[in-house]
Amino acid sequence: MSIRLENVTKLFGEQYAVDDISFEVKTGEIVGFLGPNGAGKTTTMKMITGFLAPTAGKIFINDQPVWENPGAVKKITGYLPENNPLYYDMYVTDYLEYVAGLLQMEKGSINQRVREMVVVCGLDREKHKKIGELSKGFRQRVGLAQALIHDPQILILDEPTTGLDPNQIIEIRNLIKEAGKEKTVILSTHILPEVEAMSDRILIINEGKIVADGSPESLRKASGEGLTIRVKVDAETSTETVIEALKSIPGVSAVDLFNDNNTFIVTGDSGDLNRLIFHSAIANNFVLLEMTTIETKLEDIFKELTTT
């Protein structure tokens, strides 16, 4: 099931929550949806699931407009909202059976499916408790179970690992990755390493606009390659000579002196920066003592794109 947004805008009064965004998610793709608080992530997810109507633009599920038949979209969509609304007075299994009934699952298959979700989501020891008696982490698991109970083709998960401990996060991460082999998945989270671990692709939204779209590797590459190099600096090879030689390399955007007079930080957009620096050292007859790649972190990219 593919998801496609075309020039989608959502206004609350005069405020743009989402501002003319377009993107597509293909079947079997896990997309991490990132952005600071108030950027428009949750609003976008609610529009995709049919809980909110866009002010302008169109949303398609498998080329069918969502708002022509929102009920049909909800039947094939599993949705875990950010605040995970649950009935705290209901027992875990009763709640899952109730949700399955709301989704009009075949009555004969409901009990078996509930048992499967209890095991898959790690709720076996808690299944006879009331939801209000569970820890926040286990309540989150119940939310995931209800999103998966009808084996949906689309999964929309808003902060799915909130309140989970590290072991639970790993389990849920594996569950989402397994589901993503057959389903179309959009998930949002503020835990950036989790996005890298789970997502095939990352969308970053800021102030209602998409500011980045690509794989973690492509986003890092677009932000520029970085290297730390150490050069033997003496009377014959001055700091100024090294900086001038490095700046002349095609693709180099900046050269900075770091800490002392023989360590430099070189940034650029060439995919072959280390080889070019090595050849420059030979051509200019200076001794290259060390060269280390600076790995661009997703946190740095996120900060650069979402702060002014």
Image (cartoon, rainbow, N blue to C red):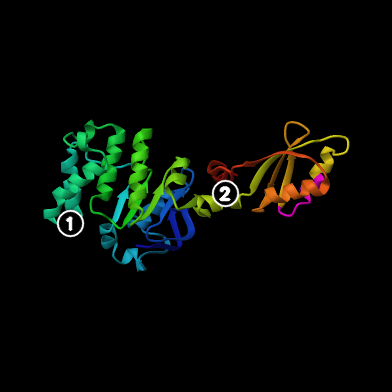
- Residue 249 colored in magenta in the image: yes
Which residue is found at the position 27% from the left and 37% from the top?
139
Closer to the camera in the image, 292 or 168:
292
Q: Tell me the kind of residue under disc 2.
A: Arg
Rendered-image quadrant of the N terminus: bottom left
Residue underneath mark 2: 220
The reply, left or right, for residue 92 in relation to residue 44 is left
* Location of residue 44 (image quadrant): bottom left
The earlier-in-sequence mark between 1 and 2 is: 1
Label 2: few (<14), some (14–19) or many (≥20) C-alpha neighbours in 10 Å: some
Which residue is found at the position 67% from the left and 53% from the top?
270
Rendered-image quadrant of the C terminus: top right
Q: What element carries label 1?
A: loop
Part of the protein shown in magenta? 244-251
Whether residue 258 is visible to the viewer of this picture, yes or no, is: yes
Q: In this view, does 197 lie above or below 163?
A: below
